Amino acid sequence: MVTIILTSHGSYAQGIYDTLACFSKDLNNVHTLCLGDDSIYDFNAKAESLIASVTGDVLVMADMFQGTPFKTFYTLLRDRKKAKIVVNISFVDALTALLNHQNELSFVVQQVLDNPGVQEVSTGTLIQDTRPDDE
């Protein structure tokens, strides 16, 4: 079974979760973590606690590549073998993952990637923005 973590800026991930609840009563394997008014440090602490509570395969579904929610989970999961991160998610992507969560992680990820716009980011290969104006 794959544990699904929805993460985003604002309440986007929570909105997806709330809509999933209209389609399934069993959301025990779905968690959300939204970066709202909390500090980045508080968000990171909550993410660490969430990851520590999860055993087995993990699929993190983030709202956007290189945003703080993505980077936080990427950092926490980069050495975990049974974890994948996808970005640019929508409700349809989360529903696809939920409907397939009983399968192997690789199968669930492939089903999600079949939806348009979603991208997988392999842990261990974070692309860094190295524009000269960055310090």
Image: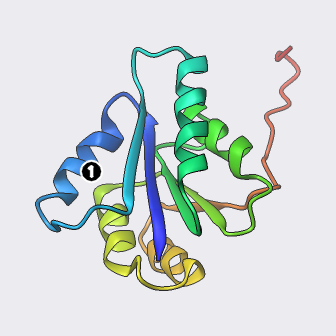
The residue lying at 88 percent from left, 21 percent from top is: 132
The residue lying at 86 percent from left, 31 percent from top is: 130
Residue 48 vertical position relative to residue 79 in the rendered view, above or below: above
The residue lying at 83 percent from left, 15 percent from top is: 133
Asked if residue 119 lies left or right of residue 16, the reply is: right
The residue lying at 67 percent from left, 69 percent from top is: 82
- Crowding at mark 1 (Cα within 10 Å: few <14, some 14-19, many 20+): many
* Residue 86 figure quarter: bottom right
Residue 111 vertical position relative to residue 65 in the rendered view, above or below: below
Query: Which secondary structure lies at badge 1?
Result: helix
Quadrant that contains the C terminus: top right
Residue 11 vertical position relative to residue 126 in the rendered view, above or below: above
Asked if residue 68 lies left or right of residue 82, the reply is: left
The type of residue carrying mark 1 is Tyr
The percent coordinates of residue 125 (x first, y second) are: 82, 55
Q: Which residue is mark 1?
A: 17
The percent coordinates of residue 91 (x first, y second) are: 29, 57
Asked if residue 53 lies left or right of residue 131, the reply is: left
The percent coordinates of residue 9 (x first, y second) are: 43, 30
Depth order, front residue of 111/33 = 33
The percent coordinates of residue 77 (x first, y second) are: 70, 52
Identify the image's colour scheme: rainbow, by chain, secondary structure or one colour.
Answer: rainbow
Residue 57 vertical position relative to residue 88 in the rendered view, above or below: below
